[in-house]
Image: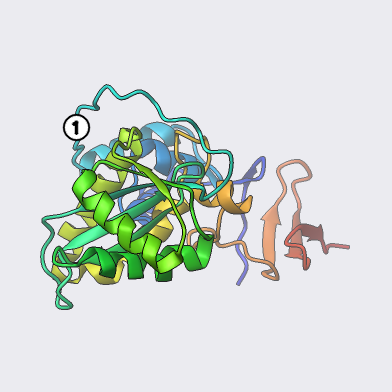
Amino acid sequence: MPTARRWHGDRICIPNIKSIRDLILKEAHETAYSIHPGSEKMYQDLKQKFWWYGMKREVAEYVALVKAEHQKPAGLLRPLKIPQWKWEEIGMDFIVGLPRTQSGFDSIWVVVDRLTKVAHFIPVKTTYSGAKLAELYMSRIVCLHGVLKKIVSDRGTRFTSHFWKRLHESMGTNISSTDRWADERTNQILEDMLRACAIQYGTSWDKSLPYAEFSYNNSYQASIKMSPFRALYGRRCGTPLHWDQPGEKQLVWSRNHRRRRTTSTNDSGEFEDCSN
């Protein structure tokens, strides 16, 4: 059965019913498609679809109750030059010391495009050699985004030189590298989220990485004023939280005309009036 809705612009007005608002907040923060965003990211995502008075304050209060903030002091590094195109330069780091999964993974390899902030989370073992990591990089990164020009990492010259030697051998090309990742904020956001994910899912955290990766890439990032997916594709991707899908019929309560009208979406995803 279709339900009546009130609209604030193009956003759904949520009534002052605690159970409904709590359900939306829980969905936006704790499900596999969200995985513990910060309050600003969560607010930016929710306000794309919903509105209620005091929503930003309630989001901040909700996040403060369910998420512990872990902030590390940022180092004084000179910012790196912004890349000219997507996936020309990457930042790379490892989240280590995680519970060992049934598949033997104990670390997460984080690879981030420095321009769009799109990230890939790859479960790995600390025993992996440079050759194994180069093989993973080819299958998980190069096949999707092509060959990059530069890597930025703070793992040290010994690691990066060994890894890139193997990668050069695999691709037959030269890639420059530097041993500092100046984007500490992005690095810290990712580490906080992934460690929270490992705590929540225990020794099966590797199974949740696809959800964590989607959640991060589809969420608002303050450094680029949009989601990484929007920076890469020109739009955010759909989630179960955004119920309006092409072809779905709805009953809309019009504030202006005080009448009900049925709407449906055409092939382009835009609403068209189907009332007489």
Could you tell me which quadrant the N terminus lies in? bottom right
Position of residue 207 in the picture relative to residue 219 (left or right): left
| Viewer-closest of 204 and 67 | 204
Residue at 63% in and 65% down: 245
Residue at 27% in and 40% down: 188
Residue at 19% in and 67% down: 128
Position of residue 72 in the picture relative to residue 3 (left or right): left
Could you tell me which quadrant the C terminus lies in? bottom right
Amino acid type for the residue under numbered disc 1: Lys
Quarter of the view holding residue 264 = bottom right
Residue at 15% in and 54% down: 96
Residue 161 visible here? yes
Q: Say above or below: 227 vs 243.
A: above
Residue 225 position within the rendered picture, expressed as x and y whole percent measured from the top left: 52, 35
Mark 1 surroundings within 10 Å by alpha-carbon count, few (fewer than 14), some (14 through 19), many (20 or more) = few
Residue 143 position within the rendered picture, expressed as x and y whole percent measured from the top left: 49, 68
Residue 249 position within the rendered picture, expressed as x and y whole percent measured from the top left: 69, 68
Q: Say above or below: 3 vs 68.
A: below
Position of residue 80 in the picture relative to residue 101 (left or right): right
Q: Which residue is mark 1?
A: 72
| Viewer-closest of 186 and 182 | 182
Query: Number of callouts in the render?
Result: 1
Position of residue 222 in the picture relative to residue 165 (left or right): right
**The residue tagged with tag 1: helix, strand or loop?**
loop
